[in-house]
Image: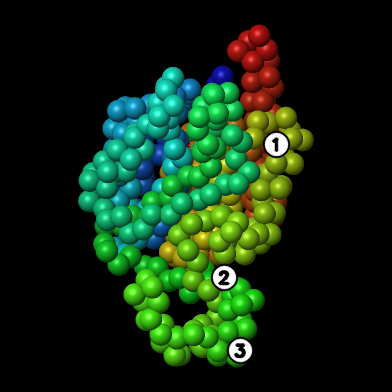
Amino acid sequence: MQDSAHAFGFSETEPLYSTKLGSLYCGKSDELLSSPGFRKIQGKVQLIFTSPPFPLNTKKEYGNFTGAAYVEWLGKFAPLLTKLLKPDGSIVLEIGNAWQRGEPVMSTTVLRALLKFLDEGGLHLCQEFVCYNPARLPSPIQWVNVERSRVKDAFTRVWWMSPVTRPKADNRRVLREYSDSMKKLIRTKKYNSGPRPSEYVIGAHSFATDNGGAIPPNVIGADELPSLTNILKGTNTRSSDQYQLFCRDNRVPLHPARMPSELAEFFIKFLTEEKDLVLDPFAGSNTTGSVAENLGRRWLSFESKFAYAASSLSRFKPALVPKRRAQRIIAALQVSSASAINSPALTS
Ligand SMILES: C[S@@+](CC[C@H](N)C(=O)[O-])C[C@H]1O[C@@H](n2cnc3c(N)ncnc32)[C@H](O)[C@@H]1O
């Protein structure tokens, strides 16, 4: 299947589409970001937020690397991306777990990839987050459903990195509503102060102050915990709904590894302020760009596959993208999906 911008009459070195706040390029981010045209953004990016292709055993449509080749491939992005950061900037990577082929044991590829990435970029690991997805289908199927010897793999890891130990960050931008019991405690100011078994000492006034909300944990999406996703639910789901409807109506495949908008929303709010520049080098359906746009941040996204890049346009309100450009992209997308449907690989 033809899947480059070139094959559909678009240039890779110009944005496929732009809004007032950002642009999406359809091409390989490593090639584009190393080209002279992008030198001007070196030292200007506040946050690189992305979910790179995962190291899979069975290759997804977008052709992920596996094993040592994956570690090398991802590691090469570290110096390239670090160079783009402002002095107090951050890189946040979301990566799923990988399993060894044919055995019920986990692959350590993602962990090796993290260490390589930190080394190659001269980066600190500021904090690790776990993103729990209760809706995930049971996998790996053989070990979980057939042999019943493993449990459902239901989280991805999110690594927050920076070349400095104190990058720009403010958890006051991501506070959650207090629980009912906490609200009561602030109201009544009655609780047991003093030492706890954990050796913490709770002061007489520690919990009496209303700080405007609770500080979120680094576990995202766990039901039993005060969850980020619960708090943010509904705030930014519109673009995802629009995207799904658009793909269905135009018979375009949905991106198979979309991230929840809430995840992007959390890190963009936490690590940037309005007008800061957010970059996603593996944009897929451009969740990052659309969330950044809604939050008033400037953004730059890169996606190598034309169909994913083109259909991501539907995440943006029509008024944001010049009409002629949008019509041309949609016409090319329809040609691309018709050729995919008729290709022997899919019809046989
Ligand atoms: C895990 S997906 C990202 C999904 C995205 N976060 C979303 O919410 O839709 C990774 C994407 O990176 C793209 N990709 C792989 N290598 C690339 C490269 N060198 N440059 C740009 N995009 C690339 C793949 O086509 C794929 O769509």
The amino acid pointed to by label 1 is Cys
Residue at 39% from the left image edge and 60% from the top image edge: 46
Mark 1 and mark 2 residues within 8 Å of each other at the beta carbon: no
In this picture, residue 77 sits left or right of residue 345: left
Residue at 46% from the left image edge and 40% from the top image edge: 96
Q: Would you name the residue on which mark 2 appears?
A: 176
Who comes first in sequence, dot 1 or dot 2?
2
Between 272 and 110, the one lying in front of the other is 110
Q: Is mark 2 within 8 Å of ligand 1?
A: no
Q: Would you say residue 178 is visible in this rendering?
A: yes
Which is in the foreground here, disc 3 or disc 1?
A: 3
Q: Position of residue 335 (x, y in %)?
A: 67, 25
Q: Position of residue 107 (x, y in %)?
A: 37, 31
Q: Would you name the residue on which mark 3 appears?
A: 187
Q: How many numbered badges does the structure rendering display?
A: 3
Task: Report helix, strand or loop for mark 3.
Answer: helix
In this picture, residue 70 sits left or right of residue 57: left
The amino acid pointed to by label 2 is Arg
Which is in the foreground here, disc 1 or disc 2?
A: 2
Determine which of the numbered discs, if any, sits on residue 155 in the image.
none
The quarter of the displayed image where residue 77 is located: top left
Who comes first in sequence, dot 3 or dot 1?
3
- In three-dimensional space, the C-alpha distance between marks 3 and 1, rounded to whole angstroms, equals 49 Å
The quarter of the displayed image where residue 100 is located: top left
Q: Would you say residue 324 is visible in this rendering?
A: no
Between 154 and 335, the one lying in front of the other is 154
